[in-house]
Image (cartoon, helix red, strand yellow):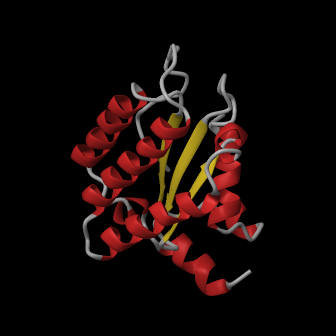
Amino acid sequence: MRPGRIFRHLLTPRWWSHRPFGRATLDAIEQAIHAAESGHRGELRFVIEGPMPWQALWRGEMARSRAIRLFSDLRVWDTEHNSGILIYLQLVDHHLEILADRGIAARVPQMQWDAICRAMEDEFSRGRFHEGALAAVAQAAELLRTHFPAQDRGDNELPDRPVVL
C-alpha cells in the first residue's frame, strides 16, 4: 500500500478526473459500441473510473485487479458466447486495461488487446481522449469481427453506455 497513491485517489475530485470525458464523448462512445456490435457477436463494455473507492485502495487493488472485479460486477462474463470485452480506464493512475472473456481470449492473444491499450495511451498523452477512446472501440470491434463474426446476432446482452465511476 503506497500512501502517495492513496492520497492521490482520496484527494482527486471525481469531476476533475472525468473532465476529458464529457457528454459528447460518452455519447460518441455509446454510438460507436452500438454500431460496432452489429458486425460481431462480442459485447463491449467501456468503464471510466476516476478515484477508486477507499476499500479498493485499502485492499491494494491495482488497475488490473480492479478491472477484473468490475468485469465480474458488471457481468461482462455473463454473455451467451463468452464474448464480453471490458475496456477499463483508471484515470487517476493513468492506467488502461482490456479484459476479454474466455471465448475471446481463446482466439485473441492478450498482446493484441495490450497493443490497443498502448495506442489509446498514446492518444491520451496528446490530450486526444475522444479520438483515443473511439479508436480503441474501433480496433476492438475489428478484432471481434475477425474472430467472432455476426452469425445470427442475438439481443444486445450488455448496455452500450459507458460506465462512469
Instruction: Specify the quadrant of the image occupied by residue 2.
Output: bottom right
Find the residue positioned furthest to the left.
24
Image side of residue 67 versus residue 134, left or right: right
Question: Residue 67 falls in which quadrant of the image?
Answer: bottom right
Query: Can the viewer see residue 93?
Result: yes
Write the residue at 33% across / 76% down: 125
Image quarter of residue 78:
top right
Give coordinates of residue 123: x percent, y percent.
31, 69
The furthest residue to the right? 59
In the rendered structure, the answer to whether residue 117 lies left or right of residue 84 reads left
Residue in the image at 39% along x and 47% along y: 137
In the displayed structure, 122 sits above or below 72; it is: below
Q: Nearest the camera: 133 or 5?
A: 133
Q: Residue furthest front?
A: 146
| x, y percent for residue 135 | 33, 54
Quarter of the image with the N terminus is: bottom right
x%, y% of residue 74? 62, 37
- Give percent across and percent down for residue 68: 69, 52
Q: Report the residue at 40% width, 28% height from top.
A: 39
Q: Is residue 163 visible?
A: no
